[in-house]
Image: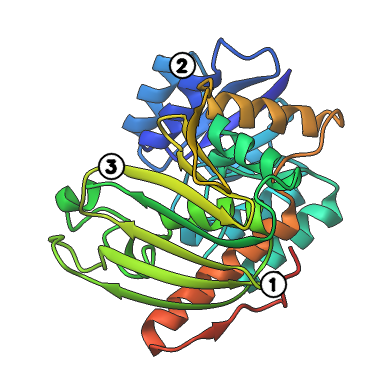
Amino acid sequence: MLRAASIGMGWWSDELADAAQGKSDAIRIVTCFTQSAEKRAAFAEKYGTAQHDSYEAVLADDGVDAVILTTPHSTHAEQVIAAAAAGKHVFCEKPFTLTRASAQAAVDACAKAGVVLAIGQNRRWHSATRELKRRVEGGDFGTLLHAEANFSVPSALSYPPELWRSNRVESPAGSITGLGIHMIDALVYLLGPIARVAAQAHRRAVPVDIDDTTSALFEFESGASGYLGTMFACPHTSYINVYGTGGNAFGQIDNSQLILQSADGVRREEPIQPNDTLRLELDEFAAACAGEAQYTVTTEEAVHGIAVMEALVEAAAAGQWVEVAGGGEA
């Protein structure tokens, strides 16, 4: 049983704890830390954990094997590097970091320490995404031509100014860090590395000073093209569509629905069984820490995803195509 510490007591820490605590035979949250004594006490009571009064105390605890980071994006690299130095495995929520350089530094620290680094790109575990991956690898779509994705929610319409997400440092290009990074990762998972990006980002409706409407065009290393849309101010939307010479697919990811269109234009729905993506990713993380599995998101892909996000932010500011740093190493 992997003994983990939950770091950062926001709503997502509870989502992960709800998925695993008392349900998984592979991982258990044994303690927690956040700067708010009230929040960590509430978490400890709710999930039956101990609590620590500093991150350093967590890392010094021999009863902790791993940390689960649900902290502000800008703190991830430093926290990952500190955990690696303490010999703790790391599960880090997305986005991994905000720059490719800091992502690579964190990856290098974990590799040097011999600890597992896992990034919580949970949409890779969705049944619809997995079925799309199986069909891409099986050649069902022939030559891949294009893919498009959208992940949007209305949450920023009610963001208070004091929320850590309500600023352009933590939320560059608006919802890219909170939402779009999911679909960047999914598109890389399905179509491979991205070579260059064009993008635009605007503030249209939210009360805080971040962009709420972002779109991007991608050119993949394979020559395929892609599109990403993500909004922080509209009803929930989550889809990935794939187009090829042999057929098309239309996936409603969060609803576990997949429509397949053959080359002759006939459409049919593929039965998809919903699954618990958070439980699956945490169990796989624990298995990787035990040396029993390879975590689905490789560290090369994790760094590449941040390089794509960084290029997208730059492209939106510059109004021109930007090459993705690293040459598509994913």
Q: Amino acid at mark 3?
A: His
C-alpha distance separating marks 1 and 2:
45 Å
Q: Does label 1 or label 2 sit earlier along the sequence? A: 2
Viewer-closest of 291 and 201: 201
Q: Quadrant of residue 92?
A: top right
**Residue 28: image x %, image y %?**
62, 19
Quadrant holding the N terminus: top right
Point 37% across, 61% down: residue: 229
Is residue 99 visible in the rendered structure shown here? no
C-alpha distance separating marks 1 and 3:
30 Å
Label placed on residue 276: none
Q: Dot 3 corresponds to which residue?
A: 236
Q: Quadrant of residue 290?
A: top right
Q: Is residue 173 left or right of residue 247?
A: left
Q: Dot 1 corresponds to which residue?
A: 221
Q: Residues within 10 Å of mark 3 (few under 14, many from 20)?
A: some
Q: Amino acid at mark 2?
A: Tyr
Closer to the camera: disc 1 or disc 3? 1
Position above or below: 254 against 140: above
